[in-house]
Image (tube, rainbow, N blue to C red):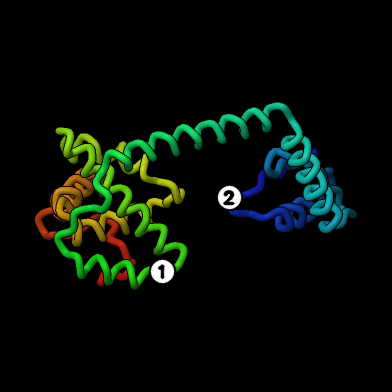
C-alpha cells in the first residue's frame, strides 16, 4: 500500500484525483488522510465516489459532534462568557463618558457618514466604544498605555479582525483627543523591529487603514 500526503491548499477533489493517479502508476492501493478522514483509492476507482465518501463522512462527524455532550458544554461556556462580557462592558460604559471627546468633530462626522455599511459601521462602533472605555479608565488615573489593550478587548462586540483594529486606530488617531497618544502606543506595540518608531516619527500608523476618513 502507498501513502499520499495532500499538499497545503489542496481540495478534496484534487486529492482524490491524485490518489487514483498514484494508484494507477504504482498498481497499489493508496491511502491518505484529508482533514483527519481516512481515504483509500485503487486504480479503477472514481474520484467522484471518493469525494462523496469524504463529504458523507464529514457530515456524519459534524452531526455526531453537535449532538455530543462536549458540544453542548462548549455552547454553554460560550454563552456564559458572552453574558459576563456584556455585563462588564455595560458597567464600564456606564462609568465612561457618554461620548468620546473629539478634537476633530467635523472629521469624525464625515468618517461616520462615509462608512455606513456593515463592515465600516462595525469599525466605527468599535472605535467609539473603545475610546469611551479608555477615557473612563484614564479619568480614574490609568494611563492610556495601561488600559488600551484591555479596553480594546472589552470594546469588541463585532468580532473585529486585525485589519478592522488598524482602521479604528487610524480613525481615532485623527479625530480623538488622545488619538496621537494612541497612535504612538499602537505603533510601538505592533512593531517587530524599529518600524513603529519610524512611523511615530513620520506621523503614520502601522498597517494603515484604507477606510475612508473624512
How crowded pointer 2 is (Cα within 10 Å; few <14, some 14-19, many 20+) is rated as few
User: For numbered disc 1, what is the local secondary structure?
Assistant: loop
Taking the spot 32% from the left edge, 42% from the top edge, the residue there is 93
User: For numbered disc 2, what is the local secondary structure?
Assistant: loop
Q: Quadrant of the N terminus?
A: top right
Q: Where is residue 33, by image quadrant? A: top right
Q: Quadrant of the C terminus?
A: bottom left
Position of residue 36 relative to residue 132, above or below, is: above
Taking the spot 36% from the left edge, 45% from the top edge, the residue there is 155
Q: Where is residue 124, by image quadrant? A: bottom left
- On the picture, is 195 further left or further right than 60? left
Q: Position of residue 75 (x, y in %)?
A: 62, 34
Which residue sits furthest left? 201
Which residue sits furthest right? 44
Residue behind mark 1: 116
Q: Position of residue 130 (x, y in %)?
A: 30, 47
> Of discs 1 and 2, which sits in the foreground?
1
Position of residue 151 relative to residue 13, above or below, is: above
- On the picture, is 143 further left or further right than 21? left
- On the picture, is 27 further left or further right than 126? right
* Residue 7 visible in the snapshot: yes
Pick the front one: 97 or 185:
97
How crowded pointer 1 is (Cα within 10 Å; few <14, some 14-19, many 20+) is rated as few
Query: Are discs 1 and 2 less than 8 Å apart at CB?
Result: no
Q: Which mark is residue 8?
A: 2
Q: Which mark is residue 186?
A: none
Tell me the distance, in whole angstroms, between the alpha carbons under discs 1 and 2: 37 Å
Amino acid at each position: 500500500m502507498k501513502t499520499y500526503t495532500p499538499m497545503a491548499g489542496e481540495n478534496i477533489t484534487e486529492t482524490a484525483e491524485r490518489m487514483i493517479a498514484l494508484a494507477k502508476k504504482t498498481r497499489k492501493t493508496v491511502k491518505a488522510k484529508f482533514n483527519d478522514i481516512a481515504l483509500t483509492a485503487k486504480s479503477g476507482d472514481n474520484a467522484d465516489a471518493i469525494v462523496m465518501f469524504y463529504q458523507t463522512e464529514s457530515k456524519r462527524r459534524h452531526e455526531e459532534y453537535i449532538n455530543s455532550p462536549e458540544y453542548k458544554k462548549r455552547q454553554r461556556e460560550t454563552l456564559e462568557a458572552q453574558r459576563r462580557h456584556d455585563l462588564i462592558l455595560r458597567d464600564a460604559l456606564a462609568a465612561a463618558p457618554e461620548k468620546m471627546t473629539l478634537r476633530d468633530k467635523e472629521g469624525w462626522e464625515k468618517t461616520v457618514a462615509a462608512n455606513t455599511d456593515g463592515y465600516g459601521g462595525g469599525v466605527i462602533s468599535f472605535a467609539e466604544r473603545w475610546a469611551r472605555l479608555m477615557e473612563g479608565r484614564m479619568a480614574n488615573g490609568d494611563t492610556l498605555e495601561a488600559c488600551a489593550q484591555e479596553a480594546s478587548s472589552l470594546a469588541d462586540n463585532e468580532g473585529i479582525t486585525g485589519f478592522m483594529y488598524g482602521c479604528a486606530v487610524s480613525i481615532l488617531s485623527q479625530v480623538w483627543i488622545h488619538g496621537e497618544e494612541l497612535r504612538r502606543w499602537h505603533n510601538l506595540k505592533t512593531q517587530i523591529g524599529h518600524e513603529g518608531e519610524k512611523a511615530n516619527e513620520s506621523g503614520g500608523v502601522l498597517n494603515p487603514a484604507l477606510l475612508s476618513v473624512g
